[in-house]
Image: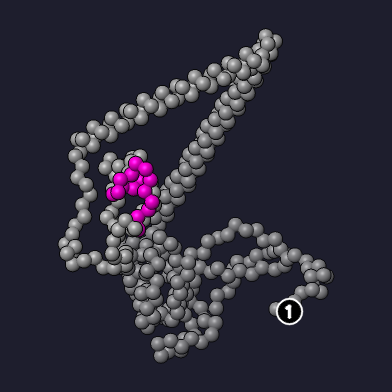
Amino acid sequence: MLRALRRCRPGPVPLPALPPALGPGLGPGLGPGLCPAWAPRAVPVRGRKTRHDPPAKSKAGRVKLPPPVDPEELLVVLERYRQHRLVLSALRAEFRAEVLQRQREERLAAGGSAEELEEHRRLMAWNEEQNARQRARREERLRKEEEEQKRRKLEIAEKQARKMEAFLEEKEKEVLQLQEEAKNFITPENLEARIEECLDNPRNYNFAIDKDGRIVKRTVLS
Amino acid sequence: MPRYELALIVKAMQRPETAAVLKRTVEALMERGAIVRNLENLGERSLPYKISKHKERHKRGGYFLIDLEAPPSLVSPMMDHLGRDIDVIRRAFIKHPVAKAEECTGILPASPQEKLSARKN
Protein backbone atom coordinates (compact mmCIF):
# COMPACT_ATOMS: atom_id res chain seq x y z
CA MET A 1 0.00 0.00 0.00
CA LEU A 2 2.82 2.36 0.93
CA ARG A 3 4.80 1.48 -2.11
CA ALA A 4 1.91 2.34 -4.39
CA LEU A 5 1.74 5.82 -2.87
CA ARG A 6 5.16 6.61 -4.26
CA ARG A 7 3.64 8.04 -7.45
CA CYS A 8 1.86 10.66 -5.38
CA ARG A 9 5.18 12.01 -4.14
CA PRO A 10 5.98 15.43 -5.56
CA GLY A 11 9.04 14.13 -7.47
CA PRO A 12 9.89 13.03 -10.96
CA VAL A 13 9.44 9.41 -12.01
CA PRO A 14 11.73 7.42 -14.31
CA LEU A 15 10.46 7.56 -17.85
CA PRO A 16 10.38 4.33 -19.88
CA ALA A 17 13.18 4.28 -22.45
CA LEU A 18 12.23 5.72 -25.83
CA PRO A 19 13.79 7.87 -28.58
CA PRO A 20 14.19 11.38 -27.25
CA ALA A 21 12.36 12.83 -30.28
CA LEU A 22 9.04 11.46 -28.99
CA GLY A 23 9.56 12.58 -25.40
CA PRO A 24 7.87 15.73 -24.14
CA GLY A 25 9.76 18.92 -23.68
CA LEU A 26 11.66 18.51 -20.48
CA GLY A 27 11.56 21.31 -17.97
CA PRO A 28 14.37 22.59 -15.75
CA GLY A 29 15.51 20.27 -13.02
CA LEU A 30 14.40 17.12 -14.82
CA GLY A 31 17.04 14.72 -16.07
CA PRO A 32 17.05 13.01 -19.47
CA GLY A 33 15.34 9.90 -18.06
CA LEU A 34 12.73 11.53 -15.81
CA CYS A 35 9.29 13.08 -16.18
CA PRO A 36 6.97 14.62 -13.54
CA ALA A 37 4.76 12.04 -11.84
CA TRP A 38 1.55 13.92 -12.63
CA ALA A 39 2.29 14.59 -16.31
CA PRO A 40 0.36 12.57 -18.86
CA ARG A 41 2.56 9.75 -20.08
CA ALA A 42 3.81 10.16 -23.59
CA VAL A 43 3.89 6.40 -24.19
CA PRO A 44 1.35 3.86 -22.98
CA VAL A 45 2.91 1.40 -20.53
CA ARG A 46 1.52 -1.64 -22.32
CA GLY A 47 4.29 -1.66 -24.86
CA ARG A 48 3.72 -3.48 -28.13
CA LYS A 49 0.47 -5.32 -27.53
CA THR A 50 -3.00 -3.91 -26.99
CA ARG A 51 -5.37 -5.23 -24.38
CA HIS A 52 -7.10 -7.42 -26.97
CA ASP A 53 -3.94 -9.43 -27.87
CA PRO A 54 -3.43 -12.79 -26.13
CA PRO A 55 -0.59 -13.00 -23.57
CA ALA A 56 2.72 -14.60 -24.60
CA LYS A 57 3.50 -18.34 -24.20
CA SER A 58 6.26 -17.53 -21.73
CA LYS A 59 3.62 -16.08 -19.44
CA ALA A 60 1.47 -19.23 -19.58
CA GLY A 61 2.07 -20.41 -15.99
CA ARG A 62 2.49 -16.94 -14.53
CA VAL A 63 0.75 -16.44 -11.26
CA LYS A 64 0.48 -12.84 -10.15
CA LEU A 65 0.69 -12.54 -6.39
CA PRO A 66 0.09 -9.40 -4.39
CA PRO A 67 3.07 -7.91 -2.59
CA PRO A 68 3.76 -9.89 0.62
CA VAL A 69 2.59 -8.27 3.80
CA ASP A 70 3.98 -8.93 7.24
CA PRO A 71 0.93 -9.17 9.54
CA GLU A 72 2.60 -7.87 12.70
CA GLU A 73 4.13 -4.98 10.87
CA LEU A 74 0.75 -4.26 9.27
CA LEU A 75 -1.00 -4.26 12.62
CA VAL A 76 1.59 -2.03 14.17
CA VAL A 77 1.46 0.38 11.26
CA LEU A 78 -2.33 0.53 11.21
CA GLU A 79 -2.47 1.10 14.95
CA ARG A 80 0.02 3.94 14.66
CA TYR A 81 -1.91 5.52 11.82
CA ARG A 82 -5.14 5.24 13.79
CA GLN A 83 -3.65 6.97 16.80
CA HIS A 84 -2.07 9.64 14.68
CA ARG A 85 -5.33 10.40 12.88
CA LEU A 86 -7.22 10.39 16.15
CA VAL A 87 -4.88 12.94 17.64
CA LEU A 88 -4.99 15.11 14.54
CA SER A 89 -8.76 15.13 14.31
CA ALA A 90 -9.03 15.89 18.04
CA LEU A 91 -6.70 18.83 17.63
CA ARG A 92 -8.66 20.08 14.64
CA ALA A 93 -11.94 19.83 16.53
CA GLU A 94 -10.40 21.63 19.47
CA PHE A 95 -9.16 24.49 17.30
CA ARG A 96 -12.48 24.70 15.47
CA ALA A 97 -14.37 24.94 18.75
CA GLU A 98 -11.98 27.61 19.98
CA VAL A 99 -12.42 29.67 16.83
CA LEU A 100 -16.19 29.41 16.97
CA GLN A 101 -16.21 30.39 20.62
CA ARG A 102 -14.09 33.44 19.89
CA GLN A 103 -16.37 34.45 17.02
CA ARG A 104 -19.43 34.07 19.22
CA GLU A 105 -17.94 36.16 22.01
CA GLU A 106 -16.85 38.80 19.57
CA ARG A 107 -20.31 38.94 18.05
CA LEU A 108 -21.93 39.24 21.46
CA ALA A 109 -19.50 41.89 22.64
CA ALA A 110 -19.95 43.87 19.38
CA GLY A 111 -23.77 43.62 19.18
CA GLY A 112 -24.94 43.43 22.79
CA SER A 113 -25.32 46.00 25.48
CA ALA A 114 -26.48 45.06 28.95
CA GLU A 115 -30.22 45.27 28.14
CA GLU A 116 -29.86 43.10 25.08
CA LEU A 117 -28.01 40.45 27.01
CA GLU A 118 -30.63 40.67 29.72
CA GLU A 119 -33.40 40.37 27.12
CA HIS A 120 -31.68 37.41 25.55
CA ARG A 121 -31.34 35.66 28.88
CA ARG A 122 -34.98 36.36 29.74
CA LEU A 123 -36.22 35.03 26.42
CA MET A 124 -34.09 31.92 26.81
CA ALA A 125 -35.58 31.36 30.25
CA TRP A 126 -39.10 31.79 28.87
CA ASN A 127 -38.35 29.31 26.10
CA GLU A 128 -37.00 26.84 28.59
CA GLU A 129 -40.10 27.10 30.71
CA GLN A 130 -42.40 26.67 27.70
CA ASN A 131 -40.42 23.59 26.79
CA ALA A 132 -40.78 22.25 30.28
CA ARG A 133 -44.54 22.81 30.18
CA GLN A 134 -44.91 21.00 26.87
CA ARG A 135 -42.78 18.20 28.16
CA ALA A 136 -44.99 17.82 31.19
CA ARG A 137 -48.12 17.74 29.04
CA ARG A 138 -46.61 15.26 26.66
CA GLU A 139 -45.57 12.96 29.44
CA GLU A 140 -49.00 13.19 30.96
CA ARG A 141 -50.58 12.28 27.66
CA LEU A 142 -48.22 9.39 27.11
CA ARG A 143 -48.85 8.05 30.58
CA LYS A 144 -52.60 8.23 30.06
CA GLU A 145 -52.32 6.43 26.76
CA GLU A 146 -50.24 3.71 28.31
CA GLU A 147 -52.78 3.21 31.02
CA GLU A 148 -55.51 3.11 28.43
CA GLN A 149 -53.60 0.49 26.50
CA LYS A 150 -53.06 -1.63 29.58
CA ARG A 151 -56.68 -1.40 30.51
CA ARG A 152 -57.77 -2.41 27.01
CA LYS A 153 -55.40 -5.35 27.03
CA LEU A 154 -56.75 -6.48 30.35
CA GLU A 155 -60.28 -6.21 29.08
CA ILE A 156 -59.47 -8.26 26.03
CA ALA A 157 -57.78 -10.90 28.14
CA GLU A 158 -60.77 -11.04 30.42
CA LYS A 159 -63.15 -11.37 27.52
CA GLN A 160 -61.09 -14.18 26.10
CA ALA A 161 -61.04 -15.96 29.41
CA ARG A 162 -64.79 -15.63 29.72
CA LYS A 163 -65.33 -16.92 26.19
CA MET A 164 -63.05 -19.84 26.90
CA GLU A 165 -64.97 -20.63 30.05
CA ALA A 166 -68.30 -20.44 28.31
CA PHE A 167 -67.04 -22.71 25.56
CA LEU A 168 -65.71 -25.24 28.02
CA GLU A 169 -68.99 -25.21 29.86
CA GLU A 170 -70.87 -25.85 26.66
CA LYS A 171 -68.67 -28.75 25.81
CA GLU A 172 -68.99 -30.15 29.31
CA LYS A 173 -72.76 -29.99 29.04
CA GLU A 174 -72.66 -31.73 25.69
CA VAL A 175 -70.43 -34.45 27.02
CA LEU A 176 -72.70 -35.04 30.00
CA GLN A 177 -75.74 -35.16 27.78
CA LEU A 178 -74.04 -37.66 25.52
CA GLN A 179 -73.13 -39.77 28.51
CA GLU A 180 -76.75 -39.75 29.56
CA GLU A 181 -77.93 -40.76 26.13
CA ALA A 182 -75.29 -43.44 25.92
CA LYS A 183 -77.24 -45.46 28.40
CA ASN A 184 -79.91 -45.95 25.74
CA PHE A 185 -77.65 -47.05 22.94
CA ILE A 186 -77.99 -50.43 21.32
CA THR A 187 -75.26 -52.88 22.28
CA PRO A 188 -74.70 -56.42 21.01
CA GLU A 189 -76.17 -57.68 24.27
CA ASN A 190 -79.48 -55.89 24.16
CA LEU A 191 -79.77 -56.03 20.37
CA GLU A 192 -82.37 -58.80 20.33
CA ALA A 193 -84.46 -57.18 23.04
CA ARG A 194 -84.34 -53.83 21.24
CA ILE A 195 -85.39 -55.38 17.96
CA GLU A 196 -88.33 -57.12 19.61
CA GLU A 197 -89.33 -53.94 21.33
CA CYS A 198 -89.02 -51.98 18.10
CA LEU A 199 -91.17 -54.42 16.16
CA ASP A 200 -93.77 -54.30 18.89
CA ASN A 201 -94.14 -50.51 18.82
CA PRO A 202 -94.68 -49.10 15.37
CA ARG A 203 -94.47 -45.29 15.39
CA ASN A 204 -96.50 -43.06 13.17
CA TYR A 205 -95.25 -39.56 12.40
CA ASN A 206 -98.13 -38.58 10.16
CA PHE A 207 -100.59 -35.94 11.27
CA ALA A 208 -103.42 -33.88 9.83
CA ILE A 209 -103.85 -30.15 10.29
CA ASP A 210 -106.49 -27.71 9.16
CA LYS A 211 -106.51 -23.98 8.65
CA ASP A 212 -107.59 -23.34 12.21
CA GLY A 213 -104.46 -25.06 13.50
CA ARG A 214 -106.06 -28.15 14.92
CA ILE A 215 -103.68 -31.11 14.79
CA VAL A 216 -104.82 -34.70 14.58
CA LYS A 217 -102.08 -37.22 15.32
CA ARG A 218 -104.02 -40.43 15.11
CA THR A 219 -104.16 -41.44 11.47
CA VAL A 220 -104.84 -44.64 9.66
CA LEU A 221 -101.79 -46.59 8.59
CA SER A 222 -102.45 -48.39 5.37
CA MET B 1 -68.77 -38.38 14.93
CA PRO B 2 -71.56 -37.03 12.79
CA ARG B 3 -75.01 -38.48 13.15
CA TYR B 4 -76.75 -40.28 10.38
CA GLU B 5 -80.15 -41.74 9.89
CA LEU B 6 -80.50 -44.92 7.91
CA ALA B 7 -83.97 -45.15 6.39
CA LEU B 8 -84.66 -48.72 5.36
CA ILE B 9 -87.56 -50.24 3.47
CA VAL B 10 -87.49 -54.00 3.89
CA LYS B 11 -89.59 -56.60 2.20
CA ALA B 12 -92.95 -57.38 3.81
CA MET B 13 -92.05 -60.57 5.71
CA GLN B 14 -92.99 -62.44 8.85
CA ARG B 15 -91.76 -61.20 12.12
CA PRO B 16 -88.79 -63.55 12.68
CA GLU B 17 -87.39 -62.86 9.22
CA THR B 18 -87.72 -59.09 9.67
CA ALA B 19 -85.99 -59.44 13.01
CA ALA B 20 -83.21 -61.37 11.29
CA VAL B 21 -82.78 -58.67 8.64
CA LEU B 22 -82.58 -55.96 11.27
CA LYS B 23 -80.18 -57.98 13.34
CA ARG B 24 -77.76 -58.58 10.52
CA THR B 25 -77.97 -54.94 9.38
CA VAL B 26 -77.23 -53.62 12.85
CA GLU B 27 -74.42 -56.12 13.28
CA ALA B 28 -72.88 -55.09 9.97
CA LEU B 29 -73.03 -51.48 11.09
CA MET B 30 -71.45 -52.16 14.43
CA GLU B 31 -68.79 -54.27 12.83
CA ARG B 32 -67.76 -51.28 10.72
CA GLY B 33 -67.47 -49.09 13.74
CA ALA B 34 -70.81 -47.32 14.00
CA ILE B 35 -72.70 -46.64 17.20
CA VAL B 36 -76.38 -47.43 16.89
CA ARG B 37 -78.49 -45.14 19.02
CA ASN B 38 -82.01 -46.12 18.33
CA LEU B 39 -84.20 -48.30 16.19
CA GLU B 40 -87.62 -47.13 15.08
CA ASN B 41 -90.39 -48.97 13.34
CA LEU B 42 -92.70 -46.92 11.13
CA GLY B 43 -94.94 -49.90 10.54
CA GLU B 44 -95.63 -52.15 7.61
CA ARG B 45 -97.34 -50.01 5.00
CA SER B 46 -98.16 -50.17 1.36
CA LEU B 47 -95.53 -48.50 -0.75
CA PRO B 48 -96.50 -45.32 -2.65
CA TYR B 49 -95.77 -47.13 -5.91
CA LYS B 50 -94.77 -50.60 -7.00
CA ILE B 51 -91.00 -51.06 -6.63
CA SER B 52 -89.08 -53.72 -8.55
CA LYS B 53 -85.99 -54.88 -6.77
CA HIS B 54 -83.95 -58.08 -6.80
CA LYS B 55 -86.25 -59.62 -9.44
CA GLU B 56 -89.40 -59.05 -7.40
CA ARG B 57 -92.20 -56.54 -7.51
CA HIS B 58 -93.08 -55.11 -4.11
CA LYS B 59 -96.35 -53.50 -3.07
CA ARG B 60 -95.93 -53.52 0.71
CA GLY B 61 -92.83 -52.97 2.81
CA GLY B 62 -91.65 -52.47 6.35
CA TYR B 63 -90.29 -49.00 7.10
CA PHE B 64 -87.48 -48.79 9.61
CA LEU B 65 -85.33 -45.95 10.88
CA ILE B 66 -81.88 -46.54 12.38
CA ASP B 67 -80.33 -43.64 14.30
CA LEU B 68 -76.56 -43.98 14.31
CA GLU B 69 -73.23 -42.20 14.78
CA ALA B 70 -70.66 -43.20 12.22
CA PRO B 71 -67.57 -41.93 10.41
CA PRO B 72 -68.33 -40.64 6.92
CA SER B 73 -66.18 -43.37 5.37
CA LEU B 74 -68.79 -45.86 6.41
CA VAL B 75 -71.52 -44.63 4.11
CA SER B 76 -70.39 -45.93 0.71
CA PRO B 77 -69.40 -49.48 1.78
CA MET B 78 -72.60 -49.77 3.77
CA MET B 79 -74.72 -48.70 0.82
CA ASP B 80 -73.02 -51.36 -1.32
CA HIS B 81 -73.55 -53.96 1.37
CA LEU B 82 -77.23 -53.14 1.72
CA GLY B 83 -77.65 -53.10 -2.04
CA ARG B 84 -76.60 -56.72 -2.13
CA ASP B 85 -79.10 -57.71 0.56
CA ILE B 86 -82.14 -59.19 -1.20
CA ASP B 87 -84.50 -58.36 1.62
CA VAL B 88 -83.81 -54.64 1.52
CA ILE B 89 -85.92 -52.79 -1.01
CA ARG B 90 -84.58 -49.31 -0.49
CA ARG B 91 -81.81 -47.80 1.60
CA ALA B 92 -80.92 -44.19 2.33
CA PHE B 93 -78.39 -42.51 4.53
CA ILE B 94 -79.30 -39.01 5.62
CA LYS B 95 -77.62 -36.65 8.00
CA HIS B 96 -79.50 -36.49 11.24
CA PRO B 97 -82.07 -33.72 10.90
CA VAL B 98 -81.28 -30.81 13.17
CA ALA B 99 -84.40 -29.07 14.42
CA LYS B 100 -84.15 -25.39 13.45
CA ALA B 101 -85.43 -22.91 15.97
CA GLU B 102 -86.94 -20.65 13.32
CA GLU B 103 -90.45 -19.43 13.85
CA CYS B 104 -92.92 -19.59 11.03
CA THR B 105 -93.84 -16.04 10.04
CA GLY B 106 -96.83 -17.10 8.01
CA ILE B 107 -97.82 -16.09 4.50
CA LEU B 108 -96.81 -12.53 3.70
CA PRO B 109 -99.36 -10.76 1.50
CA ALA B 110 -97.86 -9.76 -1.84
CA SER B 111 -98.42 -6.14 -2.78
CA PRO B 112 -100.00 -5.30 -6.17
CA GLN B 113 -96.72 -3.77 -7.37
CA GLU B 114 -94.90 -7.04 -6.74
CA LYS B 115 -97.59 -8.91 -8.59
CA LEU B 116 -97.26 -6.55 -11.54
CA SER B 117 -93.48 -6.62 -11.73
CA ALA B 118 -93.17 -10.33 -10.95
CA ARG B 119 -91.24 -12.17 -13.60
CA LYS B 120 -92.22 -15.52 -14.94
CA ASN B 121 -89.24 -17.66 -13.90
Q: Residue at x 58, y 16 (%)?
A: A105
Q: Based on the displayed image, in which of its 4 quarters is residue A62 positioned?
A: bottom left
Mark 1 is on which residue type?
Answer: Lys
Residue A7 visible to the viewer: no
Q: Would residue A28 be counted in the magenta stretch?
A: yes
Q: Which residues are magenta?
A: A22-36
Image position, residue A59 (x, y; %)? 19, 62
Q: Quadrant of residue A28?
A: top left
- Please report the residue visible at 19 percent of the width from the left and 57 percent of the height from the top: A63
Seen in the picture, residue B94 relative to A32 is either above or below; the reply is below
Question: Percent position (x, y) of residue B69?
Answer: 40, 63
- Residue drawn where x is 45% and y is 44% of the image: A168
Position in image of residue B31 (x %, y %):
30, 68
Q: Is residue B63 visible?
A: yes
For residue A70, which quarter of the picture?
top left
Q: Is residue A65 above or below residue A156?
A: below
Q: Is residue B85 magenta?
A: no
Which residue matches tag 1?
A: B120
